[in-house]
Amino acid sequence: MDQNAIFLFGASEKGPYGKPLRCSSLPQLLDTCGIPPEGSEGISYAMQTLLFHRELLFFRVEEEGFSADAYRQGLKILCNAKLDFTLSAICMPGLGDREIIEAAGQICTLHRSFLILNPKDLYDYLTAK
């Protein structure tokens, strides 16, 4: 079945690192990921994804914006995997790292999808030297 999915990087209370977790409902998200750490935005974006009836692939990182190797690993998975869904967007709240954002942008261009950043992260990206 070809579904529209959002690949979202975020911190959570539980769940494995390094493996995208497919979620299709709010109860499943809560059971799989638990409550968000303080200051995290990933679970909030995940909830919005599910409320808009999109498939969610939640990629758990230790700390949003600071787990560069985990972000690279998730993007590598997206590049190398045969996707059984239509990638609608990559969501990276809390990340302002130019190199990772540009790599995600290339994947989005390839899949004709969106890159979702929050305003602060976009500002950090645009003003980084």
Image (spheres, grey):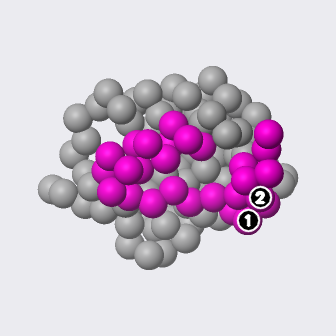
Q: On the image, numbered disc 2 is attached to which residue? A: 123
- Amino acid type of the residue that numbered disc 1 sits on in the rendered structure: Pro
Q: Hey, which residue is sitting farthest right in the picture? A: 38
Figure quadrant of the N terminus: bottom left
Image disc number at residue 12: none
Q: Hey, which residue is sitting farthest front in the picture? A: 129
Give the residues in magenta: 101-129
Q: Is residue 56 visible?
A: no
Q: Residue at 51% x, 26% y: name it.
A: 73
Residue 85 is inside the magenta segment: no
Q: Hey, which residue is sitting farthest left in the picture? A: 1
Q: Is residue 129 visible?
A: yes
User: Are the residues tagged 2 and 1 within 8 Å (C-beta)?
Assistant: yes
Q: On the image, numbered disc 1 is attached to which residue? A: 119
Q: Nearer the viewer, residue 120 or 39?
A: 120
Few, some or many residues within 10 Å of mark 1 (<14, 14–19, 20+): few
Left or right of residue 67: residue 88: left
Q: Tag 1, which secondary structure?
A: helix
